[in-house]
Image (spheres, rainbow, N blue to C red):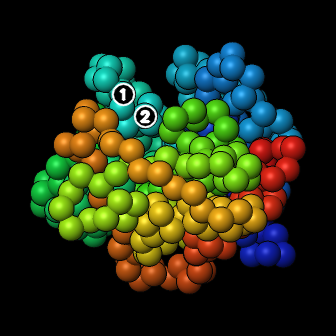
């Protein structure tokens, strides 16, 4: 990180102060922690709620962290510890969330507090935004983050709106010359999949949700299309493997001149049908797909297509290639889903 540091043989700055990772026991957060620690780049303090379902703590079980604290301890933590960077991935991330007060407290006000801290402490802030900010995609998927461009977006659920609200607030801070962290990065994650998502329940990726059926040769149910001109199973997503997401995050934090909001997807789109056919093929069975009606409550706000525009990511110098769905799904199956351990 761009703090007081020594530089290792790899050329990566080795931070002397810990990195704070909110949501560090969650899906993307725990993968980030694993990569950070495997490279011995920094010590890590995790801020997260582990719960009692005996799943989330396993995301961190293989890794040494300096501390794990609940969100209620944040203020004490900020006043008593000097960090080299804050990676803010904690959020209420369910797209079906209904408690607006809780979502705003967790996704907007907490993000503002961390922005303030990083501005005052002079340390980088990397935070999670979401592709849900694009709503139905009518305005496209460009990550132009001027206030004028952001004002055109219309998120279709509470989660997406809360993320958009903070993106808009952050950009306003920059454009009106308010205090900002020396490096600030917002990442609009598209459909991320990979190890350490077992705790997510119905919010798991289609690969994790349907692996067992595919591996048993059983039938998988996908939503029928309710839009003219789009075939059943032809709904599309930009599926991005979590290891690729983490690689981008680490790269950005070692390039201190990078600032702004960026899409984080592959720049390609894949149908749900093709994704499930890949999963069946990886498990050695022919596909058996049945289409069922989408619940009426979802139809109005359902996204039929997403694809990240990653031209800005490429323009700042990020050259690594992203795994295709075929590559990512097969890696996920071989190294995690088909083993006794789903955790990285």
Task: Give the percent coordinates (x, y) of residue 87.
Answer: 56, 46
- Closer to us: 285 or 136: 285
Q: Is residue 215 left or right of residue 81?
A: right
Quadrant of the rendered structure where residue 330 is?
bottom right
Please say if the residues under marks 1 and 2 sit with CB atoms less than 8 Å apart: yes
| In the depicted structure, whether residue 221 falls above or below residue 94 | below
Classify mark 2: helix, strand or loop: loop
Classify mark 1: helix, strand or loop: loop
| In the depicted structure, whether residue 20 falls above or below residue 191 | above
* Residue at figure coordinates x 51%, y 68% from the top left: 274
- Closer to us: 154 or 44: 154
Q: Dot 1, how many residues are within 10 Å of its Cα: few (below 14), some (14-19), or many (20+)?
A: few
| Quadrant in which the N terminus appears | bottom right
User: Which residue in the structure is indicated by mark 1?
Assistant: 97
Task: Give the percent coordinates (x, y) of residue 327.
Answer: 66, 73
Q: Is residue 341 visible?
A: yes
Residue 94's disc is 2
């Amino acid at each position: 990180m761009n703090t007081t540091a020594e530089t290792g043989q790899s050329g990566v700055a080795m931070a002397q102060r810990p990195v704070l990772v909110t949501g560090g026991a969650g899906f993307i957060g725990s993968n980030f922690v694993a990569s950070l620690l495997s490279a011995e780049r920094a010590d890590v303090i995790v801020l997260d709620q582990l719960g009692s379902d005996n799943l989330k703590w396993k995301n961190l079980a293989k890794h040494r962290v300096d501390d794990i604290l609940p969100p209620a301890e944040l203020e004490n933590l900020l006043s008593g510890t000097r960090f080299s960077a804050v990676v803010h991935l904690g959020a209420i991330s369910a797209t079906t969330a209904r408690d607006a007060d809780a979502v705003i407290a967790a996704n907007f006000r907490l993000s503002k507090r961390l922005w303030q801290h990083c501005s005052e402490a002079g340390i980088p802030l990397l935070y999670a935004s979401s592709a849900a900010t694009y709503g139905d995609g009518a305005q496209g998927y460009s990550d132009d983050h001027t206030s004028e461009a952001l004002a055109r977006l219309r998120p279709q659920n509470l989660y997406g709106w809360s993320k958009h609200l903070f993106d808009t607030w952050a950009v306003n801070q920059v454009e009106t010359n308010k205090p900002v962290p020396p490096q600030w990065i917002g990442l609009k994650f598209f459909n991320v999949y990979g190890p350490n998502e077992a705790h997510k329940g119905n919010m798991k990726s289609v690969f994790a949700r349907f692996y067992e059926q595919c591996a048993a040769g059983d039938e998988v149910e996908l939503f029928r299309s309710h839009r003219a001109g789009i075939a059943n199973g032809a709904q599309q997503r930009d599926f991005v493997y979590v290891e690729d997401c983490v690689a981008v995050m680490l790269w950005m934090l070692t390039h201190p001149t990078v600032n702004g909001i960026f899409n984080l997807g592959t720049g390609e789109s894949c149908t749900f049908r093709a994704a499930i056919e890949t999963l069946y093929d990886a498990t050695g069975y022919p596909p058996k797909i049945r289409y069922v009606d989408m619940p009426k409550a979802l139809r109005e706000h359902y996204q039929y297509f997403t694809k990240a525009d990653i031209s800005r990511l490429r323009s700042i110098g990020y050259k690594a290639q992203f795994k295709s769905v075929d590559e990512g799904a097969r890696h996920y199956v071989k190294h995690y889903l088909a083993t006794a351990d789903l955790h990285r």
